[in-house]
Structure formats: structure tokens, C-alpha cells
Image: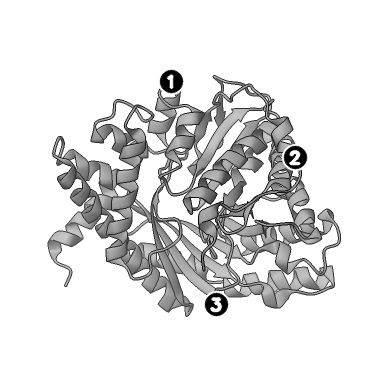
Amino acid sequence: MVNIHEVLETNEMIEKENLDVRTITLGISLLDCADNNLDRLNEKIYEKITTKAAKLVETGKDIEKEFGIPIVNKRISVTPVSLVGASACKTSDDFVTIAKTLDEAAKKVGVNFIGGYSALVSKGMTKADENLIRSIPKALSETEMVCSSVNLGSTKTGLDMDAIRLMGEVVHETAEFTKDRDSIGCAKLVVFCNAPDDNPFMAGAFHGVTEADAIINVGVSGPGVVKRALEKIHGEDFEVLCETIKKTAFKITRVGQLVAKEASERLGIPFGIIDLSLAPTPAVGDSIADIFEEMGLERAGAPGTTAALALLNDQVKKGGVMASSYVGGLSGAFIPVSEDQGMIRAVNDGALTLEKLEAMTCVCSVGLDMVAVPGDTKPSTIAGIIADEMAIGMVNQKTTAVRIIPVIGKSVGDTVEFGGLLGYAPVMNVNKFGCEGFINRKGRIPAPIHSFKN
């Protein structure tokens, strides 16, 4: 039974501590849309998305009104497009037509983003994979809602260095194609190592081929709630600290569970997972870095930050798992720079560098996220940064990702405005020494020795 105290407590989380359901995401399989005729393929894709998602936004708004719980985004993820378009798409421009179809369908049903303009190339690229990857700059520059992702390696297969080198070029080209908008195309492009079978969370979302025809996933977030809870036990020992985070994560996840079940029943679509991710927003008081400071660090990036993040991540996951039988995704704490006021302050104060961020990704849920770098950063350097992050994921058997934004025309010390949930970011310094000789080698980095098990 839910008692009145819990009702009031949840209401305070929503009103004063920025608790929200970050997204309801509808995953849609496009495998049955495959066709060797490009026009028919696009027609099938548009028809299926607009039919399956016709009531998604309306249902989300109804749940918001009835329960008083903010649902910030309504989104769609689809089967990786390199698979769906392999037969019909002979060129990169052919794939761009699918990106435009996805964009039109997203606008028709009224969602915020649609993900799945993706390729999975952890061991090698097919011609279709390569064509899609090369089409990404044009696709993201000519659409508004489309998000793209590429998986470049895994613990089982190693790292596809040819694809990593290509992605360094693609990221830089995407920045050039959208330089009139502060290279915002790169904010909708994520590269992974060990991408999960199904990832419903933007910008790296895609609907896995192991999933049902359609599935409902819910992401819930509340860094402000955790910070407020820690303020009440200021200075207590680690046992109290961990228990407080865990119990708070449990309460937050229960809110998401309620929304997920309601959305599933009303849409007649199976419920997939709850994702509890402490994903910050530009709003004051909704910051991961502020949680670190409440734990006792002067700034995010100070000695002890990686340990604090490891503690936070683990306790969030433990609390979430107890609250739902279907916790999944990339649950834990995210550390995007541009979306977190405290992280931005830490960068501006000199406490947080790119290298420290990389160290923190060893224990966080994803990786280098929404990091702005100078526009003259070489494609090979971008590829080197990607390779480093992919190696962390490969060796540690965890999902890691990079969403890096070389902002054309900007240099260290400048600030770039993305707007909305994407916020703004200081342009961070990048190591000036080159890595061309390493990145330009052909082939793969083999899987680590501990991957050889059934």
C-alpha cells in the first residue's frame, strides 16, 4: 500500500527537486519493412512508424495530467537502418532518403527525437554499413529529429580500427556540415563499444533485433532528488551515504515503474525496461557535479571524484534493481558536460579536464558525453579519443561511448550554446600531440585475453 507520506514525498520531489520521467520511448522493429525498392522501403517505414506511434504523444500527455508527473520527452527508436536499408540502398545518398523519412514520421507523430540511424560494426563493415556511416554528416545536417549511432567494438570481438578511423572523419565532417548551428549535428551522434542489444536512450538509441515488434521503455531521472537527500545526512559516514542514495534511487524508480505500466496498458504494447539514469539537465539544482560537492569534493574533478562516481553509480543501480524487475539500459550516473551546470563550472574553474573525464568513464554508465572541443581538432585526434574510450569499454567489459563536438570556429575558452536539454558547454582543451601514425594503421585491435569464454 502507498501511504499519504509517500504521496507527499513524491510530490515534493517533482515540485522542488526536478524529479521527472525523462522519456517514454517506443521501440519499433522495421525488419518487416525491408525491400529492394527504395521508394517502397521508405513508404513502408513511414507507414509503420506513423501507425505504431500514432497515440504515443497523446498517451504521454494524458499520463502527465492524471498523475502530475512531468514526462519531458516522447521518443522513438527503430531497428538499425544499415540492416533495414541494406538491400535497397546502393549509395550513401540512398540512406539519406531514409533519414528524411524518419524525420518526417517523427514530426507527424510529434515526438522529440527518433533514433536508429545506426550501424553495428564491431568486427567489420559491410558495404551497406560503410555507406550509412559515410551518409551521417549529410543525414544529420538535413534532418531535425534524427539521432545516429555506430558500435565500433566489443569485448568479444576487439576494436574495428578502420571504422574508428572513419568515424573520426565523419564526426569532423558532421561538425562542418552543421557549423552554422555550432556544429550541433555532432550532439546527435554517438559511437559505442559494447552497445547493448537494445538501447532506447538518445542519442544512441536503436531498437534491437532481439526485441519484439514494438516495446515501451521508460527513463527516469532525478539528480536533484539525490542531492537533497544527501543534504539531510551531511557529514555522515559512508554506510549512511550509500544507504541514502540506494533508498532514494528506489523511490525514483518506482515513479518510472508506474508510468511504464500505464503507458504499456494504454498503448497495448509490451513493457520493456525502466532505466534509472541520473542524467542532469541545464536547470540549476539538477546536477551530478553538485552531488559530488555535497559528498565533500570542492569541485568535480578534484582527487576522489572517480571514487565518488563509482559509489554513486553502484548505489543507484542497487536501488533501481530493487524497485523493478526490469531495470536495464545504461542505468546509473551520466556525466555530460554541456547538460550539467556543476560540470561546466568545474571545467571553467580548471578542476575538470578531458583526461580526468576519461578516467571517470571507467566507472560511469557511458563515457565522454557532450564534450565540446576546438573546431580545428584533427579527425585523427578525434579518432584517437574515440579509440581510447572504446578500449576502456573493451577491457572492462562495459558499455562506453563518445559524443564529442568539434565546434567549427571556436577555440578553448569559448562557449557554445546548443539550447534546450542540450544546454551550453565550454570548449575544452585537447592534447596537441598527434596520433596519425597509430590511427592510420589498418585492421582490428584483437579482443582481450579474458574475452575467451563461453
Sequence-first tag of 2 and 3: 3
In terms of depth relative to the viewer, which is nearer, 213 or 367? 367
- At x 56%, y 36%, the residue is 418
Label 2 to label 3: alpha-carbon separation: 40 Å
Sequence-first tag of 1 and 2: 1
At mark 1, the secondary structure is loop
In terms of depth relative to the viewer, which is nearer, 126 or 290? 126
**Label drawn at residue 441:** 2
Of tags 2 and 3, the one toward the viewer is 2
Query: According to the image, label 3 marks what residue?
Result: 212
Task: Please indicate, yes or no, whether residue 330 appears anywhere in the rendered image.
Answer: yes
The reply to whether callout 2 and callout 3 are in contact (CB within 8 Å) is no
Q: Amino acid at mark 2?
A: Arg
* Relative horizontal placement of residue 179, taking residue 401 as reference (left or right): right
| Disc 2 residue crowd, few under 14, some 14–19, many 20+, Cα 10 Å | few
In terms of depth relative to the viewer, which is nearer, 412 or 358? 358
Query: According to the image, label 1 marks what residue?
Result: 350
Q: Amino acid at mark 3?
A: Ala
Label 1 to label 2: alpha-carbon separation: 35 Å
Q: Is 226 drawn above or below residue 414 in the view shown?
A: below
- At x 82%, y 54%, the residue is 92
Q: Is 158 drawn above or below residue 360 in the view shown?
A: below
| Disc 1 residue crowd, few under 14, some 14–19, many 20+, Cα 10 Å | few
Q: Is 385 drawn above or below residue 55 in the view shown?
A: above
- At x 50%, y 63%, the residue is 25
Q: Amino acid at mark 1?
A: Gly
Sequence-first tag of 1 and 3: 3
| Disc 3 residue crowd, few under 14, some 14–19, many 20+, Cα 10 Å | some
